[in-house]
Image (spheres, rainbow, N blue to C red):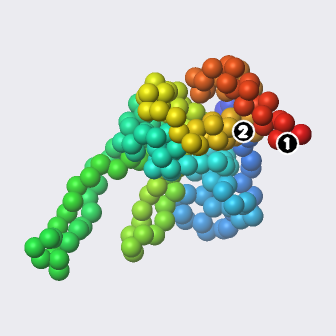
Amino acid sequence: MADFTAWIAAQREAAIARGGKPLRNIPRGNRDPFPRASNRKRGEIINPVTGEIVTGCLTISKLSDQLGLSSQKVTNALEQIGAVVRALTTKDVPMICAPEVTKPRYERVPQATREGLEGGLVVPITFDHGGRKTQCVLITPEGQAAVWAALKDEVKTSGPRPRKVETKTQVIRELLAAGHSQGSVVRQTGWPKQTVSRLVKTMEQRTG
């Protein structure tokens, strides 16, 4: 029991160091598998496994748009780093020749893995869409940095993007806010040390 208590304490300290916050004001009888907490600020998402609150998350389509790559390539990168798996799902769609009749359409949809959640790379959310529960995978700033690192060669060859600097700045800002040093940001993103240093200085000048 003592060893387990020490392990729990170490996990709590590590979560706080990453920017985690304790969940408060959780309604009683909450049966939702995704924890809810009141008084959250706009853009704060709860990781259902670690209980940490993260901001600056992007959907796969949003990140792919900023990188100038297809959603499939971004999903491939997420699958490569173990953050998601493609699960086979079905959806009833109208038949072309008889719209009043439906048929199943099979597709592979990315779903967050336990490893991706525990590593703080992705967070799944559920919402109602067309009368059915739909799950969406959000990519955290650390997950975005990992995708950047996995796709950096393809991003370089895809040509300059108007929002490339803004995207990098946002990723760096979120990683620094989570307690990462500049050296850690360089390792996480795979970007040149000079680039990270220059963007950090620009951020400081804007806030100074």
Secondary structure beneath dot 2 equals helix
Judge by depth and name the residue closer to the eye, 31 or 158.
158
Q: Position of residue 24 (x, y in %)?
A: 75, 58
Amino acid type, mark 1: Thr
The residue shown at (50%, 50%) is 62
Quadrant in the rendering for residue 89: bottom left
How far from the left and from the top, in percent, is residue 157?
44, 27
Q: Is residue 5 visible?
A: no
Q: Which mark is residue 173?
A: 2
Question: Between 183 and 117, which is closer to the camera in this rendering?
Answer: 183
Q: Could you tell me the amino acid type at mark 2?
A: Arg
Location of mark 1 (residue):
207
Q: Residue at x 46, y 24 (%)?
A: 153
**Residue nearer the viewer, 82 or 138:** 138
In the rendered image, the vertical position of residue 30 relative to residue 66, given as above or below: below
Q: Is residue 160 above or below residue 130?
A: above
**Which residue does the image show at 12% across and 76% down from the upper left?**
98
Cβ–Cβ under 8 Å for marks 1 and 2? no
Q: Position of residue 136 (x, y in %)?
A: 46, 55
Q: Mark 2 Cα within 10 Å, few/some/many (few <14, many 20+)?
A: some
Of pointers 1 and 2, the one earlier in the residue sequence: 2
Quadrant, the N terminus: top right
Residue 165 on image: x %, y %: 63, 37
